[in-house]
Image (cartoon, rainbow, N blue to C red):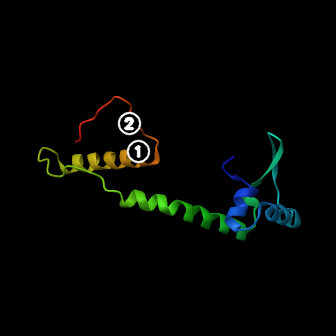
């Protein structure tokens, strides 16, 4: 289902109304799949069969939506102890990589600290 998109998402990418997308789809004979939802049916459009200008608009919208999140993750500092003489260079790189992954997971909410568990800083 990841390669299917609804008319509301297409409308956001094109900057037009959902009804405008539905009319455009009917006028241009876009292929679609209907799925049953509460209250009726919903049309889902396969990305591969959409016109090129629509796919391009969807890609631009997805990139612009992801940029603020990516920029925050890149700019967020990862706290490390680089002055630990007992670690080799590979160990420091591994530790820093793990710390970066955990920091990104915490920022997106996928990894939450457990209540009552107190962790000492590294």
Q: Residue furthest top?
A: 116
Q: Residue at x 80, y 39 (%)?
A: 38
Name the foreground residue: 93 vs 117: 117
Name the foreground residue: 32 vs 67: 67
Kindly report the distance in space between the C-alpha atoms of the residues bearing marks 2 and 1: 8 Å
Whether the residues at callouts 2 and 1 have beta carbons within 8 Å, the answer is yes
Residue tagged 1:
106
- For residue 58, above or below residue 108: below
**Tag 1, which secondary structure?**
helix
Q: Residue at x 38, y 36 (%)?
A: 113
**Tag 2, which secondary structure?**
loop
Residue tagged 2:
113
Q: Position of residue 106 (x, y in %)?
A: 41, 45
Q: Could you tell whether 104 is left or right of 53 in the image? A: left
Q: Position of residue 14 (x, y in %)?
A: 70, 68
- For residue 22, above or below residue 117: below
Q: Position of residue 64 (x, y in %)?
A: 55, 65
Q: Could you tell whether 102 is left or right of 24 in the image? A: left
């Amino acid at each position: 289902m990841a390669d299917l998109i609804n008319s509301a998402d297409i409308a956001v990418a094109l900057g037009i109304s959902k009804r405008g997308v539905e009319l455009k789809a009917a006028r241009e004979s876009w292929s679609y799949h209907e799925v049953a939802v509460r209250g009726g049916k919903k049309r889902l459009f396969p990305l591969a069969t959409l016109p090129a200008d629509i796919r391009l608009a969807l890609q631009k919208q997805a990139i612009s939506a992801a940029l603020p999140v990516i920029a925050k993750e890149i700019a967020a500092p990862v706290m490390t102890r680089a002055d630990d003489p007992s670690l080799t260079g590979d160990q420091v790189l591994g530790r820093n990589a793990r710390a970066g992954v955990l920091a990104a997971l915490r920022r997106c909410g996928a990894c939450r600290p457990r209540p009552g568990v107190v962790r000492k800083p590294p």
